[in-house]
Amino acid sequence: MCEESRSTAIVTMPEIVTIDEIRDEAPEVKTFYASFVDREVGERFRLRSGQFIMCTVFGAGEFAVSLPPSPEHDRLHITVRRVGKVTNALHALGPGDKLGVRGPFGNGFPFEEIKGKNVVYVAGGIGLIPLRSSIVHVLQHRREFGRILLLYGARTSADLLYRRDIDAWRKTDGFEPHLTIDKGEPGWGGEVGFVNKLIEKANVPVENTVAFVCGPPVMFNSTIAELLRRGMSEDHIVSTLERQMKCGIGKCQHCAIGRTLVCTDGPVYTYRQIKTLGEVI
Amino acid sequence: MYLLTTEDLATLATELGRSHDLYGPLRRPAGGQVFFDRVRGWGEIDLAAPIPSMPPKEILFPQFERILRYRYDRKTKEVAIEKRYFERPKVLFGVRACDLAGIQCLDRFLLGQEFVDDVYLAHRRKSLIIANTCVEPFPQCFCVCTHTGPSAEEGYDLNLTLLPNGGGIHAAEVGSDAGRALAERFGWEKATEADRARKNAVVERSISLFPELARDNKAWVSRLMNRVTTGFIKPEIWEYIGKQCFECGACSFVCPSCSCFNIEDAPLRSGECERLRTRDSCSFEGYTRMAGDHNPRKPVEDRRNKRFFCKMSFSQSKKYLRPGCVGCGRCAWVCPGDIGLPNVVQYVRRETTEQVTRV
C-alpha cells in the first residue's frame, strides 16, 4: 500500500496565506494578492501555467480557482468573481486576513507542443482569468511563437478585466489585442458585438495556429463553431474547463466527465478531447 | 490453510479486540436486521448472518467524517488548524467476499492513483480484514456474475470458510504477512489437502445454489460492460431508467465501491469550524451544479447513465482493476424505483435481444 502522495502538492492540510492587497478588477470581480505565512512553503510552491488551487475561506468553505502566472516572477494572486457562498465570504475579507491554499493541481497548458505556432486567445468575460497566465508565459517567451492575438469580449467596458495588463502587453512586439463589448457605450471607441465576430475582423490565422478559448458556454460554442468553419483543427483548439470540485486530487469525483476527471486529467483539454467526453459544456 | 475451532475464533477475536477496535456482523435484537458494526466481543459476532444492510465500507469510509478542525479569529487574524482523522487500529471480522471486493475498489481508487487520499489511508493502514465465505447465497446476491464470490480470492488477511459437518470448524486461508503472523502467534492446526478439497466443495456447492437468474446473467454483465463502454445503449433505455429514478441516492450509499464525497466546512457553537467529508451521490441534481447555477448535467437519465458508466465502463475498471459492481445486490434491495444494477442488466439485455430478433 502506498504510503504518501507521489506529488509535491499540498493535498489535505491547507497552507496559510495572508492577503496583502486587494484590487477591484470589475463589478463583482476582485484580485487578491497573498503570500505564504511560511516562507519555505512559498518557495516550494511551484506551479505550471493552467493549474489551479483549492482556496479555503475560513468559516465558509473551499473553492477551486485558477492560478496566476508562476509566482517566481509575480506574487501569488487569484482573481475571483463573487457568485456563491464561499466567494461572497471571500469578497468580505480585507488585507491581513488569512486564506488556506491546497495545490497546485491539474495538468497545465501545453507550451512545448505549441512552440513555433501562432497563438490566438479568445476569451469572454471572466474567461480571461485562466488564460492570463498562458498569455504572460507566451509573451515572456515571445521569440518562440508566431503571431499572438487576443480577442476579448465582455458585456460592458467596465467588465473587461486586466485593462492595465493588456495595455502593458501591447508593448510586446507583435501582440495584437482586439477588445469588444456587447453593446455600444458613450466613450467606447473599440469594437461592439460578440467576440466570435472578431475572429473574422482580426483575420485569425488557422494554419500553424493554436487557439485558447475560455468563456461562458454560449460564447464558447459559437467561437468553436467559427474556428472550425475557418478550418482550424480540433486538436489545435485548447480550452480549460470548469467543474464543481471538492477535493482537487481526483477522489471526490464531482468533476467527472465521462472517463476523465477535470481536476487531475484536466482542466486543460483540446476540443477533440472535449468532444469525445460526451457531456455538454 | 489452517483449521480453526469455534474456540480458536473466539480467542482470535478476543485477543485482537485488546489491541484493535473490533467490528463484525451483528443482528440487532429488535427486528433482526444485520449491521456490520462495532461489537463488544466475540459473543456479538454472527458469522452466519446474512450480508449486512450497509457494507463495511462504512467503517473505512464513514458517511460523515471530520478531517480538519480550525479556528479563525478575524480580529487577530490568527488561524489554528489541525488534522483530525480517526486512526485507531481496527479488525473487520467476517467481511463477505463482495464487500471485500468493494474495499479493494476503494483501495485502488483512493490510494492507487496520482494522489493518495490521506484520510482513507489513515483508516486502511491499521486495519485487519478477516473475510468470510458465503456457504450459501442470499436472495439478492449475484456475485457469481461479477466474479467477487462466494469466497474471497485476494485482499484479505484471513479468509474463513465454515466446513460442513465439522462441528463449527472453519478453514482459514492466509492472504498477507499480517495473517501469517496471526497463524504463527496462535499456532492453529495446519489443514491437509483433503481439507482444501472440502473448502473448494463448499464453494462449488454455494455457486450451485445461486438462483437461475443470477447464473444466467453472468455473460450479460460483461455484455453490459461492453455496451456501456462503447455507448451502444439507446438513449431511450436511459430515459426509461431515468424516469424510474427517485433521485434518493440510496444506491450509492449502500454500494461497497461507491466513494464520491462532498466536503463542507461546518461552524461549531464554540466558534471553531470543522471540515467534514460526507458521502455524496451522483443521483443528486446538485452534484455537478456550480456557483452561479450552471449545471452541465441536468436530466435525471443523464445522471443515471453516469452512475452505470462509473460502475461498468472499461475506463473506470482500469482505476478499480475490476468492474465497479461487486454483485452484492444491495442497490436492487434498496432502490424504490426498481432500477438496481441487476434490472439495468435486464433492460439492456431485453433491448439487445429485441434488436437481434428484429433482424
Image: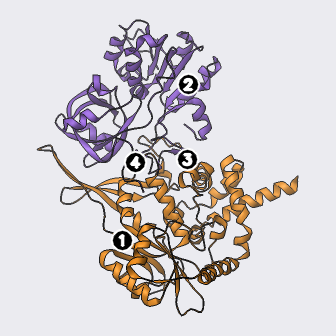
Chain colours: A purple, B orange
Q: Judging from the image, what secondary structure is the residue with disc 4 in?
A: loop
Q: Judging from the image, what secondary structure is the residue with disc 2 in?
A: strand
Q: Nearer the viewer, mark 4 or mark 1?
A: 1
Q: Are marks 4 and 1 on the same chain?
A: no
Q: What's the distance in space between the residues labelled 2 and 4, CA to CA? A: 28 Å
Q: What's the distance in space between the residues labelled 4 and 1, CA to CA? A: 28 Å
Q: Residue furthest left?
A: B76
Q: Is residue B252 above or below residue A196?
A: below
- Report which residue position mark 2 lands on: A237
At label 3, counting other C-alpha atoms closer than 10 Å, the crowd grade (few under 14, some 14-19, many 20 or more) is: some
Residue A39: x and y, percent? 19, 35
For residue B14, what is the image quadrant?
Answer: bottom left
Q: Residue at 57%, 45% (x, y): give it.
A: A259
- Report which residue position mark 1 lands on: B90
At label 1, counting other C-alpha atoms closer than 10 Å, the crowd grade (few under 14, some 14-19, many 20 or more) is: many
- Report which residue position mark 3 lands on: B298
Mark sitting on residue A246: 4
Residue B194: x and y, percent? 62, 83
Q: Is residue A51 left or right of residue A207?
A: left
